[in-house]
Amino acid sequence: MDTKNQTIITEFVLLGFTMDPKINIGLFVLFLVTYMVTIVGNGLIICMNITNPQLHKPMYFFLCMLSFLDLGYSSAVLPKLLTDLLSTERTISLSACVIQVYVILLVEGSECLLLAVMAYDRYVAICQPLHYPVLMRWGNCYKLVGFIFMATFMLTIFPSIFTPLTMCHNRINHVMCEMLAFIKLSCENISYNELLIFSVSFISLLLPLVLILLSYAAIICSVLKIRSAGRSKAFSTCTSHLGVVALYFGTVMLMYFGPSSMYSTDQEKYSSIFYVIVSPMLNPIIYSLNNRDVKDTIKKVLTKLNPHSAETLGPVCH
């Protein structure tokens, strides 16, 4: 991103939500709690996947990768946001701003593709169970994850490197360096950049969503053929994933596919809160509450820490 201009811009000012100290203190407490829950929740998912052999399955491997991405999301934004809420000088250096833009783009694209891969994993497990050990063997899982990161880099990071912008302003009407807010600082015509963002968003958001919907259409058709006794078990492995998909894709698509008037100023700012801050916090909660294996693992951990807690949580985990 080129910053050659009459005045070389070396730092930016994040306008944030408000300058009211009382509101900022309240937001600080709220986002601090959100960040702590995000760290603990996703950290537990990762630790359980590593330490519990029962969770050494492709489905939980992808869930572990989702937790890594969510931690990257939150850690790229929330520490700086928490600092700014207690500060009157909300500045960020050019290099830090560019890194934040790239991290958000990389995590966004990777999470969309990862959710599509997780839907494919459920499709194979339910619709083609005999082929599952072959199609989802560990070698293929590692290749899929490698493909996700390579494809995301080529789709999101690579184009932005070759479309430099000349910056004339340094005041970002946002709480973070987000691409749509960042390009508004340019003194050039950004129509081409907006078209590029729309095109990349179409590939990295809509195509994975179509794959997810097709996977679940096939899953529903297959599950309806199963006897009623086995339907609930089959659907229970999918409802958590569908909840995460609805939460994430709904807010991201609202931002990137709405008309220009929708993702200008405050609309964009508040929409980003859901998929950058709220979604990473809710993902481990959604999966934990609706996944028997994860709940059983939590129960075992609590049993080791406190035998009496297991008795209390016994009815919840069954």
Image (cartoon, rainbow, N blue to C red):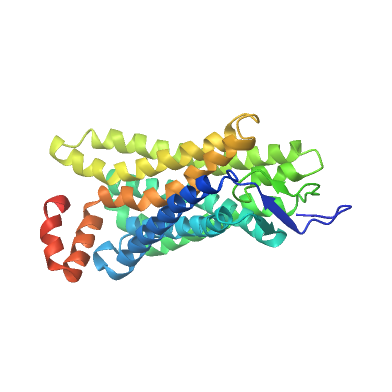
Rendered location of residue 107, percent (x, y)? 53, 54
Residue at image position (22%, 56%) is 295
Camera-nearest residue between 263 and 54: 263
Camera-nearest residue between 254 and 60: 254
> Is 50 located above or below residue 270 in the figure?
below
State which quadrant residue 84 falls in: bottom right
Rendered location of residue 115, percent (x, y)? 43, 48
Rendered location of residue 269, percent (x, y)? 57, 41
Is residue 288 visible in the rendered image? The answer is: yes
Q: Quadrant of the N terminus?
A: bottom right
Residue at image position (23%, 33%) is 224
Residue at image position (38%, 50%) is 283
Camera-nearest residue between 146 and 130: 146
On screen, residue 103 versus residue 311, left or right, reads right
Residue at image position (66%, 61%) is 96
State which quadrant residue 53 falls in: bottom left
Is residue 151 visible in the rendered image? The answer is: no
On screen, residue 139 versus residue 82, left or right, reads left
